[in-house]
Amino acid sequence: MLDVVVVGAGPNGLTAAVELARRGFSVALFEARDTVGGGARTEELTLPGFRHDPCSAAHPLAINSPAFRALPLERYGLEWLHSELAMAHPFPDGSAAVLSRSVAETAASFGPRDAGAYRRLVEPFLPQWDTLARDFMSLPLTALPRDPVTLARFGLAGLPPSTWLARRFRDEPAKTLFAGLVAHIMAPLGGFATGAVGLVFALAAHARGWPVARGGSQALSDALAAYLTDLGGAIHTDYEVKRLDDLPPARAYVFDTSPTALARIAGLGRFYDRYRYGAGVFKIDYALDGPVPWTAKEARAATTVQIGADSAEIGAALRAASREGRPPTRPFMITVQPGIVDPTRAPAGKQVFWAYAHVPNGWKGDLTDVMERQLERFAPGFRDRVLARAIAGPAELAARNANYVGGDIGSGAASGLQLLLRPRLSLHPYSTPHPAVFICSSATPPGPGVHGMSGHNAAKAVWRRLRQEP
């Protein structure tokens, strides 16, 4: 009998398997697709030689993850590449705000009236960032806080809505860039603890940047898989699990799946019926005949570029997708252009480009024209560079990855108490009514993103349970 079976080879499933194998448990991992990766894959989606990341592409949380930083992933081929600027947020007039490794450079891009306010917001947390990140990403109750005072101060700043925090700023550049940071979780700006989301992304950039992985996000998944194999773990791909009986006998089963799928497979009935899924995504991967023709020079120096004319436009786009049940007319978009630092992604002189916008969960329309009109506001002539497109709405994204229910790439709405307490209100979020079954996906704390901490935290719950057995 195996000690542990893990279902789902996304970053969290791989991390859980690695953590358990490191502690001497026998581990087998089962993945329905033909390769590991989940939300961290790389594929030729458009033309031969153009290597795209179907979901995650830039990795501020991965490079700052306490789980990944404790693993020898560089030994297995993972290499982080950094652009001159971590992120840029251009405006229609050709100017831009930026997120840089340097707090001073970032603050200066906001203008003199907000530079001081931004520095006062982030600088107190930076010296304790590594400890704060571990404490923040290990909640709840998987580890006692190492610096409870700093964590409490962070909570005072971050638990209110981001719209409250934005009142510290007087001008649009700072307000807009911060609104864009919060919008990465696809929830309205006025929600509980959304200020913390923006702060985490900003601090992550100042601490270690917003890199891409050389060769694509698949490099992270492949490094985790190679390390797991060296630890004696077994990986089985092309293996779809429909019920527990499809799996070999084990002392514990860990699922990197949506709560909906886990309930169906493990026979948990209506246990997760109150779990809410959030807005979906409409995503386009482009093969380009050259770089994106951004008007703002700063956008040409950043792998990640946020698109939204001002904070009001971003807020309206989020409300449309999350609350009003309609696609935005001027969408907020996150875009990534890895080719500016990674020439392996496309043939010489060409580029890959990645863009997504928020739409209602399960939306069935086509947002291509709307997104490209929005891009043309900030990069006139963009359409002239397009060689090919790979378009994926909510249905296509869910077909590629079953965890993306209705196109929700966060595996659950990151709003209200569910932002922090997921998939249920519980002090033991990784456990289920079945004593041998656990969940480790992004539906558990600390939530969405490629950081592996949900898998790391779930692995702790599993080995504590196994140590208690006779």
Image (cartoon, rainbow, N blue to C red):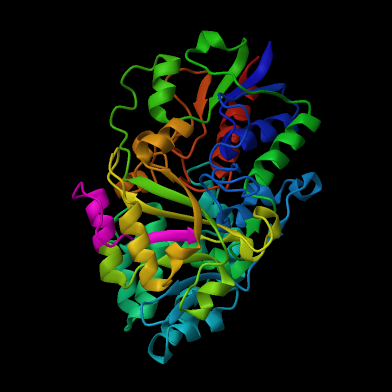
Residue 235 located left or right of residue 270: right
Among the 4 quarters of the image, the one containing residue 11: top right
From this view, report whether residue 171 is shown above or below residue 143: below
Q: Residue at x 41, y 72 (%)?
A: 380
Which of the two residues, 366 or 330, is positioned nearer the viewer here?
A: 366
Which of the two residues, 307 or 388, is positioned nearer the viewer here?
A: 388
From this view, report whether residue 386 is shown above or below residue 296: above
Q: Residue at x 49, y 46 (%)?
A: 139
Asked if the stretch drawn in magenta spans residue 327, the answer is yes
Residue 107 located left or right of residue 349: left
Which quarter shows the N terminus? top right
> Which range of residues does the magenta coloring cover?
316-335
Q: Position of residue 347 (x, y in %)?
A: 67, 56
Total marks shown come to: 0
Among the 4 quarters of the image, the one containing residue 6: top right
Q: Does any portion of residue 374 appear in the rendered image? A: yes
Q: Position of residue 451 (x, y in %)?
A: 57, 48
Residue 408 located left or right of residue 30: left
From this view, report whether residue 257 is shown above or below residue 26: below
Q: Does any portion of residue 402 appear in the rendered image? A: no
